[in-house]
Image (tube, grey):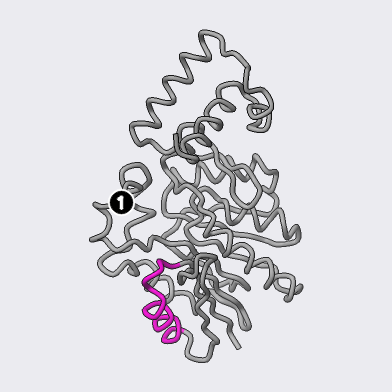
Amino acid sequence: MSESADLDAQVLLAHVLAKPRSWILAHPDALLDEYQLERYETLTRRLESGEPLPHIIGHWEFYGLDFTLSPAVLIPRPETEMLVEHALHWLVEHPARRSILDVGTGSGCIAVSLALNCPDARILASDISLEALQVARQNVLRHAVSDRVQLLQCDLLPPTSLPFDLLCANLPYIPAANMPQLSVAAHEPLLALDGGVEGVIWISRFLERAPFALASGGFILLEIEASQGSLVTGLAQTAFPQARVQLLPDLAGRDRLVTIQIL
């Protein structure tokens, strides 16, 4: 059994027994009753069929927090934590800047993480999917940030003239031609994955509209696919010719984040 498979088995056992994984590790001889064993075997078959573990157990960790999930939203990835870290760093350096727009919020993991780590922030989290917003609502309530996070169904940016200090966006960025080869496409929402021919159709639309939603001196954080660095930085520089545009790598050294600082 691989290390990943062993970890998955521990997570499933913890879910069936309603115990933390640390308890499973500390009690290797614990016995399952008939119902628990049957449920564990059923969940194991679902996992072996390719269904993602977070969908099976209905939640997953992101930025040290536990988020409710469903097949209507993307499973939060560690790479996206980089966006949250840079957002929080910028907010610390700009204490008077506290209005945030999280575009394509999905499960709400970015908006909720920012709200909990920056308690005076005011966040609007948007998504075109009503089903995704229903999951985000569960997480907003679960983490008790409904006084700081507002949810809105819309296509990318809200129809408002009020500018935001910080725009965060993790939009669909997988090139359409790559979709059939990806196992993720069989279980996670295509609406949140498919970025069109070059993978940047939604990113391009976002950058065209973003100048009208960003306050003077504001900041944009945009997650991208590793091959899109030069393309997206070019689009960003066209949309914001007077801004400082940077391309940042993730921990694996792959292009992951485009930042736009209005000067």
Q: Is residue 219 left or right of residue 173?
A: right
As drawn, the residue found furthest toward the top would be: 34
As drawn, the residue found furthest toward the bottom would be: 242
**Amino acid type at image mark 1:** Leu
Using the image, determine if residue 258 lies above or below residue 55.
below
* Residue of label 1: 182
Query: Is 40 contained in the magenta span?
Result: no
Using the image, determine if residue 135 lies above or below residue 175.
above
Q: Which residues are magenta?
A: 224-239
Quadrant for the C terminus, please: bottom right
Using the image, determine if residue 2 lies above or below residue 94.
above
What is the secondary structure assignment of the residue under circle 1?
A: loop
Which of 153/261 is in front?
A: 261
Q: Residue at x 54, y 38 (%)?
A: 59
Q: Residue at x 63, y 32 (%)?
A: 21
Q: Position of residue 146 (x, y in %)?
A: 67, 47
Which of 220/187 is in front?
A: 187
Q: Position of residue 257 (x, y in %)?
A: 50, 71
Query: Is 234 contained in the magenta span?
Result: yes
- Mark 1 neighbour class, 10 Å CA radius: few under 14, some 14 to 19, many 20 or more: few
Q: Residue at x 55, y 61 (%)?
A: 102
Q: Residue at x 51, y 50 (%)?
A: 76
Which of 74/248 is in front?
A: 248
Using the image, determine if residue 242 lies above or below residue 90.
below
